[in-house]
Image (cartoon, grey):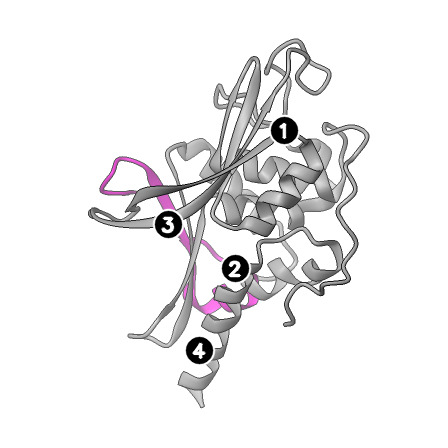
Amino acid sequence: MSERPTETAAVEPPADLLAGRPTTAYFWGHVAGSGDVADDGLEVVTGDEESAETLAAIAGGDLDRGTNVREYAHDASITRTEEEYALTVEREDLFGRSGSLGLPVDGRGNYRFAAFAGHDRELLRGLFEGCGTICFKSSTGTVGVSFVHDDGNLLALVRELIADCPVEAMTGDLSKTSSGGRWFSVDDADAADFGTWLYEGAEETGLYAPSRRRKLVRSLERAEAFDA
């Protein structure tokens, strides 16, 4: 897997952010995974600068850089400080709606992804970069992929999307995190194939977070070396 080429064309903003396009699927996946939606706007947060710039190119808005102290999902007693980029979109007329009701993510726990049915990979990639994690498990020599979010209903929907993807990727049941959220993982035996499929062709569209893809590549390489 190669990194994003410098000659990659800038992502073109869609004419309609509610229409089914790879760009809109990726954007709303991010909003669902790490965003807040209100009647007068939305905010989506990412730890990858290039991904943040891509989201801003898609939806417009203001992009701010800062730092945040986060708890580890599975152990709230452990924290890490990391850079993050927050995209804020404030409009009285929110993507053609007078409020958030009817948006793909409305901030009330409703998710309307039917328009993105032909772009499940981009939708899942946005969700993964918004609320997913990847690691190399040194004890087993396998790649670990999991999703963590406060909304169990969203995670149930993510499990359905994964079940429908063209590679076999079994998932575990939803469990509680120490901080009160929910999480599930892709079976270790399927995680590498799922991660590879998830980022296949991403560099051709620019719809991905390079830092997340680098971590996937490193984890895959370590798993291959472990088996050698």
Q: Which residue is mark 4?
A: 223
Q: Which residue is mark 2?
A: 211
- 179 vs 12, left or right, is left
* Res. 134 image quadrant: bottom left
The residue at the far left in this view is 77
Q: Earlier in the sequence, mark 1 or mark 3?
A: 1
Find the magenta span and give its range: 169-194
Give yes or no for contact between labels 3 and 2 (Cβ–Cβ under 8 Å): no
- Residue type (three-letter) at the residue carrying disc 4: Ala
- Residue type (three-letter) at the residue carrying disc 2: Ser
Q: Which residue is mark 1?
A: 61
Q: How many marks?
A: 4
Give yes or no for contact between labels 1 and 2 (Cβ–Cβ under 8 Å): no
**Residue 136, image x, y percentages:** 39, 69
Give yes or no for contact between labels 4 and 1 (Cβ–Cβ under 8 Å): no
Real-space Cα separation, disc 2 to disc 4, in angstroms: 18 Å
Q: Earlier in the sequence, mark 4 or mark 3?
A: 3
Please report the residue visible at 49 percent of the width from the left and 78 percent of the height from the top: 221
- Residue type (three-letter) at the residue carrying disc 1: Gly
Real-space Cα separation, disc 1 to disc 2, in angstroms: 23 Å
Real-space Cα separation, disc 4 to disc 3, in angstroms: 26 Å
Please name which of the two marks, 1 or 2, marks the residue nearer to the observer.
1
Q: Which residue is mark 3?
A: 82
Please report the residue visible at 55 percent of the width from the left and 49 percent of the height from the top: 49
Give yes or no for contact between labels 2 and 4 (Cβ–Cβ under 8 Å): no
**Residue 147, image x, y percentages:** 43, 48
**Residue 46, image x, y percentages:** 50, 43
Q: Earlier in the sequence, mark 3 or mark 2?
A: 3
- Residue 83 vs residue 12, the one in the foreground: 83
